[in-house]
Image (spheres, grey):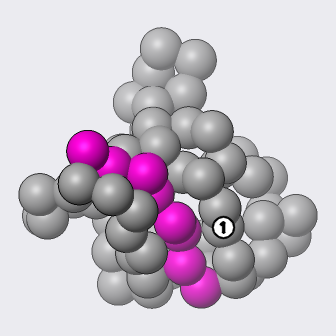
Amino acid sequence: MLIGFKIIVMGKDLEGKVINETKNTLLLETNKGTKRVIKDGNRFILHMNNKEIKVNGNDIVMRPWEYAI
């Protein structure tokens, strides 16, 4: 589950804190308000435990409890 973690969407000028997650999308709280991002076709940098983890969105197109990071 990615809720609460900071995410950067690679190749787009978008970053924020994940405030909700569905099977296909992430809802981010950004400096410019909330933005919904489709997982499929995007790559993300996840900031977790003082580390940067690159995540391919295609690998997490599932319900949050169906994968483990």
Image: magenta residue range: 24-31
Q: Is residue 51 above or below residue 41?
A: above
Name which residue lies at 79% across and 76% down.
63
Mark 1 crowdedness (10 Å alpha carbons): few <14, some 14-19, many ≥20: some
The image shows residue 28 at horizontal and vertical percentages of 45, 58
Q: Which residue is drawn at 75% across and 52% down?
A: 1
Q: Is the magenta stretch mostly helix, strand or loop?
A: strand
Q: Is residue 34 left or right of residue 66?
A: left
Q: In which quarter of the image is residue 4?
A: top right
Q: Specify whether residue 40 is in view.
A: yes
Q: Is residue 59 visible?
A: no
Residue 19 drawn at (x, y percent)? 60, 53
Q: How many numbered marks, from 0 up? A: 1
Say what amino acid the circle numbered 1 marks. Glu
Q: In this view, does 11 lie above or below 29?
A: below
* In front of the other: 3 or 44: 3
**Based on the displayed image, in which of its 4 quarters is residue 14 positioned?**
bottom left
| Position of residue 21 measured from the top left corner of the image (x, y, whole percent) | 66, 67
In the image, is residue 54 above or below residue 48?
Answer: below
> For the point 65% across and 61% down, which residue is it?
20
Mark 1 = which residue?
A: 21
Under circle 1, the secondary element is strand
Residue at the farthest right position: 65
- Residue 31, located in which quarter of the rendered image? top left
Q: Which residue lies furthest to the top in this view?
A: 50
**52 above or below 37?**
above
- The x, y position of residue 38, in whole percent, is 44, 82
